[in-house]
Amino acid sequence: MLRLGLPVIGVTDVPRAVAFWTAALGLVARAERASGTWRTLEHADGSGALAVMRSESPVEPHPRVHLDLFTDTAEEQQAEVRRLIGLGAQAVDWDSYPADPDFVVLADPDGNRFCVIDLGHTPGDGDRPEL
């Protein structure tokens, strides 16, 4: 039976990506599934969450696939955005924000875009633009 595995993020520096994503999401790097070009990151209970893989391809400025990270309130969203930037994320000058966005676009240390979403906010137009 086919099952969905893990989202994999292409990165240029695997150790840097492991440090960022484990700190950002409270994950643990699994030693059994590690190499110089691959690392599996898990929740504390051992369930898989994310993988990082060495990649030579350039970052997509408007990626077709990206991560959405959820918060429950605007205050939590703002605090998490500040924390993630402190860990090495970068604010992205996003050209597709709607008038009343429920999300903030950031980039990890390799430039991969992801969103921090306030689930307590309803966007003004009800639509989320494409990344």
Image (tube, rainbow, N blue to C red):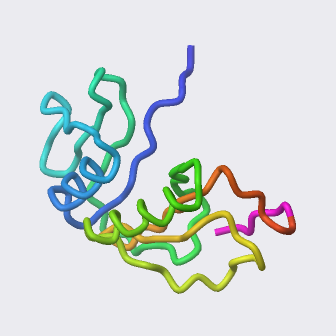
Q: How many marks?
A: 0
Magenta span dominant secondary structure: loop
Residue placed at 67% from the left, 51% from the top? 120
Asked which quadrant contains residue 40, the reply is top left
95 shown above or below 2: below
Query: What percent of the width, then of the height, locates residue 117?
Result: 59, 57
46 drawn magenta: no
Q: Which residue lies furthest to the right in this view?
A: 125
- In the picture as drawn, the residue positioned furthest to the top comes out as 1
Q: Magenta includes 130?
A: yes
Task: Say whether residue 97 is left or right of residue 40.
Answer: right
Q: Is residue 72 above or below residue 16?
A: above
How far across and down, in percent of the image, does residue 22 sit?
25, 47
Q: Where is residue 17 in the image (x, y as percent from the top left)?
A: 24, 58
Q: 97 or 71, which lies in front?
A: 71
**Quadrant occupied by the N terminus:** top right
| 88 left or right, relative to 32 | right
Q: Which of 69 and 10 is in front in this view?
A: 69
Figure quadrant of the C terminus = bottom right
* Residue plotted at (43% across, 73% down): 59
Residue at 37% x, 41% y is: 50
Q: Residue 61 location in percent, x, y?
A: 52, 78
Quick check: 17 left or right of 94?
left
At 22% from the left and 37% from the top, the residue drawn is 28
- Judge whether 114 appears above or below 24 on screen: below
Residue nearer the viewer, 121 or 28:
121
Which segment is the magenta one?
126-131
